[in-house]
Image: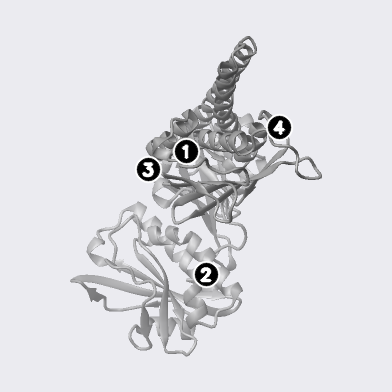
Amino acid sequence: MSELVRSHTDLDESDVRWLQLLQADWQIIADLSFADLVLWLPDREGHGFWAGGQMRPTTAPTAYVDDVVGTFVPVGRRPPLDEALATGRLVREGEPEWRDDVPVRVEAIPVRHRDKVVAVVARNTNLLGVRAPSRLELSYLQAAGELTTMIAEGRFPAPGQRSDHADSPRVGDGFVRVDSEGRVVYASPNAQSVFRRLGLSGDLAGHALADLTRSLVPPRRRLDEETLSAVMGGRVHRDTELSGESVSLIARSIPLRPGGEHIGALVLVRDVSDLRRRDRELVTKDATIREIHHRVKNNLQTVAALLRLQARRIDAVEARAALEEAVRRVGSIALVHETLSQAVEEDVEFDEIADRLGVMVGEVSSVAGRVRVRREGSFGRLLSETATPLAMVLTEVIQNAVEHGYPGESPSGADGAVGSIVMGVRREAGRLRLGVEDDGRGLPPGFDLDASTSLGLSIVRTLVESELGGRLEIGRVASGRGTRVAIDLPLD
């Protein structure tokens, strides 16, 4: 709608916000009316109308098979739209129009904002779906008529913050009509069922809804009394959530003030007990998963400590070095689980892991503290099944760069540094591209990745190509001295 407004209308930002508030609530009007709603925006040149929004009912068959948003209707094609815009009054067509062999009754509702008509809502009723109305349908239609009158008067939608409940009730969930005193005039069967689950034994009709709700909901499970009275009494446009011993419900109030007089309200209610139970189960599962990651991290750290103790008792240099490499590999996996144990979701912000791995490998190397490892770019968030093998890959690559690029190096800089390793990373087109470059001695003459017998390189190649489905390349740095490892991974 915003694009249509900028391109074709003279509506200002305040008008657009008002229309967006209307669209936030117009599913209710479509359902109460048993009709499709189309928001028509007047063209700035006065040549006609642009369709800026569309809403189909969930309570009746649609009058529009195809979407009409973005289409243009010239002046004279739909006379009710022209008349509603010019006069500011509701316009009802006498004869239905036919669309795809379906008779459709069209009504035009002017949308008033700040004493001017800024748009027109066309209400389109599929007459093939009309039958002898029940009391429920008559109550719906009466409420729809009062709301459309309020739209034409500029009294609906209600200004202010929209509800933050993603599961806010709809008309079919439970419909209650209260009078100006807050007493129930009519309640749909679904609304009756919701209150019976709360403990009501009779009918809702005739009860003061706020007092009845207060008697059914224990004090410890209520929000503040003022909110309960205001919502269930139908005095404010707001919603609230209430809980009985085993039932949770959301109630939403829509005051009715056609002509400026408060004549009552709609109170929509929805039983969300199952949703809240599932929410609690998800919270419990999330906590359990985080605890598992925490315990796995602790177990891996225990394994690393045992390997470290074993290494100290071994005199053979090669055996000690192998155990120390195993300690680093286990530590890199433990680091991912530590991050996952602190996260709510099963993905992690990998930048912190990469930075900590660079520090960890540098601190335990033969040139500890004198090889600087830095990151350029961001890994972003990665799923745990990608983060764990990638952490091991980074550990091996950085370790190889430190041990083989700078063996026995002496400090070359004023700060005692002997070299620099750069992790360059970027995300693009569903892929992660990582390059690790050092300024060390470079690859030995005749190096061939396919013929290499290095355990570390075998681990890296297996993880990158088999587990992560990526590509691995190792070569000299283009600018001269040093080695570059390039890794290209799919992110999906």
Q: Between marks 1 and 3, how big is the CA–CA gap?
A: 51 Å
Q: Which residue is mark 1?
A: 386
Q: Is there CB contact under 8 Å for labels 1 and 2?
A: no
Q: Earlier in the sequence, mark 4 or mark 2?
A: 2
Picture residue at 27% right of the left edge, 66% below the top:
65
Name the residue carrying label 4: 368
- Asked if marks 1 and 3 touch (Cβ < 8 Å), the reply is no
- The kind of secondary structure element at disc 1 is helix
Residue 482 x/y as whole percent? 59, 47
Q: Is residue 190 at all visible to an observer of this figure? A: yes
Query: Dot 2: what SS?
Result: helix
Between tags 1 and 4, which lies in front?
4
Estimate the spatial distance between the alpha carbons at disc 1 and disc 4, rounded to whole Å. 29 Å
Q: Distance between the Cα atoms at labels 2 and 3?
A: 33 Å
In the image, residue 272 sits, relative to residue 262, either above or below, namely above
**Which labelled disc corresponds to residue 19?**
2
